Image (cartoon, grey):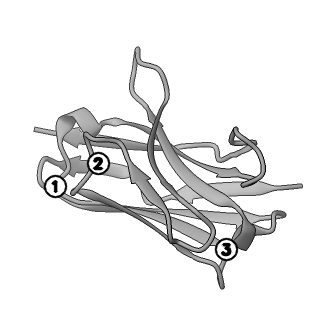
Amino acid sequence: QAQLVESGGGLAQAGDSLRLSCAVSGLPFSKYTMGWFRQAPGKERELVAALTWNSVDVWYTDSVDGRFTISRDNANDTAYLQMNNLKPEDTAVYYCAARDPTKLGYDWWGQGTQVTVSS
């Protein structure tokens, strides 16, 4: 049974930094693409960042590019999202997800962690 567990969310002020972690078990982590999504109240869930298994290909949505960094530690089956210069509009529930690179969609999801940024 695959399990993804996020941690590191919380309260922050504008300009602060937070680091989210996603511990993965039950999957061949080193072979999977990892993504971080977020969902703000009243909005659809959006992909924030994604990273291939070998960390060669990385993608960020425009609103976080230059402020957020996705990374992974294949030796410890953990993915990270470093969030710098946080803005109130970054307030959302953040989810990590894993995708088999041979498939189009993300099949495995964490339970989410709340990030709240005050101005």
Residue 86 in the figure: left or right of residue 114: left
Query: Dividing the image into 4 quarters, which one contains the N terminus?
Result: bottom right
State which quadrant residue 2 falls in: bottom right
Q: Which residue is mark 3?
A: 77
Which one is nearer the viewer's eye here, 11 or 105? Answer: 105
For label 3, the SS is: loop
Which one is nearer the viewer's eye here, 67 or 112? Answer: 67
Residue 69 lies, with reference to residue 13, above or below; the image says below
Residue 55 in the figure: left or right of residue 68: right
Q: Which mark is residue 68?
A: none
Residue 12 in the figure: left or right of residue 111: left
Residue located farthest toward the top when viewing the structure as drawn: 42
CA separation, marks 1 and 2?
Answer: 13 Å
Amino acid type, residue under disc 3 in the picture: Asp
Amino acid type, residue under disc 2 in the picture: Leu
Query: Dividing the image into 4 quarters, which one contains the C terminus?
Result: top left
CA separation, marks 1 and 3?
Answer: 27 Å
Residue in view at x 72 percent, y 55 percent: 101
Q: Which residue is mark 1?
A: 85
Residue in view at x 49 percent, y 41 percent: 37
Residue 53 image point, x, y percent: 63, 68
CA separation, marks 3 and 2?
Answer: 26 Å
Q: Which residue is mark 2?
A: 11
Residue 105 image point, x, y percent: 70, 38
